[in-house]
Image (cartoon, rainbow, N blue to C red):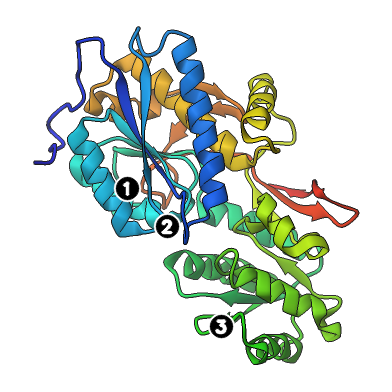
Amino acid sequence: MTTPPSQPGAQRTDGSSVQIGALVPLTRPGWAEAGQHLLAGLELGVREVNDAGGIVGRPLELVVRDTAADPRRAAAAVDELARLGVAAVVGEYHSVVARAAAARADALGLPFLCSSAVLDALTEQPTQWVARLSPPQSRGWQVYADFLLAAGHSRIAVAAQPSVYWAAGTRILRDYLAPRGGTVTELDMSAFDATASCDATVVCDELVDNRATALLLLVGHPEPAVSIVKSVRRDQRLAEIMIGAPAGQPEFAEWATLLGDDSAAIPFLRYLPERLTPLGVRVETALREQLAAAPSFVAFEGYDTVAVLADVLRTDGVDRASTAESWPRAAVEGTRGQIQFSRMPGISVWQWAGTPIQVVDRDPAEPDRFRILHVG
């Protein structure tokens, strides 16, 4: 039996742990590296909460479920976590998956603090149960469109696979660029075969025919994104075209490993400030040690998620309804700034309106180093 919204849920008084469910993509076809960074941030946050005394003396415990980028799997995980009595659910990187999780959390009356997913319509109707740290896609992708225009790109091509997320991104770009003299041409990648040289040639021919100056990758990682980049980079007719990846594929080390020098100069969105807070500087050091690599913005999102939820649970208790009522009152110093939630026009969940947004790329002279190209 599921817990209806009118019931409080997780109210242990026996000194046992306060459990929170964590949704992360840890296996393919999910972006497993993003999931690992998200989980690292969540785990570090939990360790630090427990080192500081937990939630009013009770340890915080993560109950992790791998979504593998599968919306149905995520929805089933939310059902299971609700039955287990978790105080709240956190996490998820993939927008379409987070949308399925948010719908179930809303139906069950289970607080969900979404760490990383950006799809504007995270729920169909306004809800009190869901809050989000990452910016809405419309805000981030409009910042990216501003970057394109400032860089002199008005003839944009998007290589897109079928997906609610990619379709929303294409629509945001087209609606924003059209009044400013820009055009967006969509290249259908639904049947793209990474092993077929003819498919790659067709993509390159279409870019030439459309006189595109920028190609945006609205496709999965690693494939077909990696194959498209290799094909375009090899085509001398497209030597001047800019390749972009607003969804953030180049953020992770696997991108550089798979593409080598071709991984550089591909601008993407990253949700970090120009300077981390003092907390962020300390957390960066700890995450670097934990991951044995530079932490991505997704790892900071994970840490901030726990920092916010722990503060809410300490202040208002572990009652589910109280947690949902606390979103608009939360005010927490995170790694990337002061986190507070509000209602934004067109956004159905409680939203951190101040999420920092950058457009960055990997430096061609040093692909492991990121260059900040534009700040939103």
Task: Verify CB contact (< 8 Å) between mark 1 and mark 2.
Answer: no
Q: Earlier in the sequence, mark 3 or mark 1?
A: 1
Pointer 1 residue: 102
Q: For the point 46% across and 75% down, which residue is it? A: 162
Query: 184 above or below 351?
Result: below
In the picture of the structure, the residue carrying the numbered disc 2 is: 69
Q: Which residue position holds label 3?
A: 192
Question: In the figure, residue 149 lies in which quadrant?
Answer: bottom right
Mark 1 Cα shell of 10 Å, populated few (<14), some (14-19), many (≥20): many
Between 315 and 41, the one lying in front of the other is: 41
Q: Is residue 95 left or right of residue 7?
A: right
Q: Point out the tag, 2 or 3, that comes first from the N-terminus.
A: 2
Disc 2 residue type? Answer: Ala
Tell me if mark 2 has few (under 14), some (14-19) or many (20+) residues whose alpha carbon lies within 10 angstroms of its own: many
User: Which amino acid type is shown beneath numbered disc 3?
Assistant: Phe
In the image, residue 142 above or below residue 158: above
Q: Residue at x 63, y 58 (%)?
A: 249
Label 3, residues with CA under 10 Å away: few <14, some 14-19, many ≥20: some
The x, y position of residue 228, in whole percent, is: 67, 76
Q: Earlier in the sequence, mark 1 or mark 2?
A: 2
Q: Position of residue 51 (x, y in %)?
A: 49, 11
Q: How many marks?
A: 3
Residue 81, can we see it? yes
